[in-house]
Amino acid sequence: MLHERFEAILAALKSACVEHYGDRLVSAAVFRSVARGTMRPDSDIDLLLVVGGLPRGRMPRVGTFDAVESRLCVRTAKTAARCWSRSWHSLAVYAGPQS
């Protein structure tokens, strides 16, 4: 059940990235526990995106992910119990028991 939830979240994440970045999306890689299939209900999704044409500066670059994050939170509302942004704009989707 947990793997299926993360698979659904990853599918929504891929779709949101492709929609937002379009042809500028060069590559996306999931790593750590989700990539290994050893995730827990409280695991986050570690994601590396390679995107062309991003603005200069770290925070403006990170800010471009806000639209992806918003799309993902809307799409996974039935799959994930909670969706939020952490202080460094890393995405955390809680895929544990529904509350």
Image: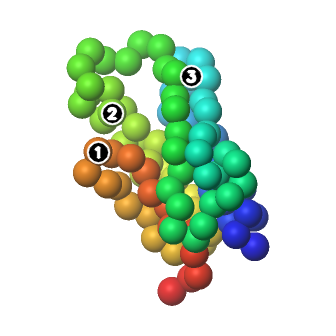
For the residue marked with disc 2, what is the amino acid? Val
Specify few, some or many for label 3: CA neighbours under 10 Å numbering under 14, 14-19, or 20 or more.
some
Q: Which residue is mark 1?
A: 88
Point out the tag, 3 or 2, that comes first from the N-terminus.
3
For the residue marked with disc 3, what is the amino acid? Leu
Q: Are marks 1 and 2 in contact (CB under 8 Å)?
A: yes
Q: Residue 24: horizontal and vertical position, in percent?
A: 53, 18
Q: Which picture quadrant has residue 97?
A: bottom right
Q: Residue 50: horizontal and vertical position, in percent?
A: 52, 22
For the residue marked with disc 1, what is the amino acid? Trp
Front disc: 3 or 1: 1
Q: Which residue is mark 2?
A: 62
94 to 63, vertically: above or below: below
Q: Which residue is mark 3?
A: 25
Q: Is residue 5 visible?
A: yes
Point out the tag, 3 or 1, that comes first from the N-terminus.
3
21 to 75, vertically: above or below: above
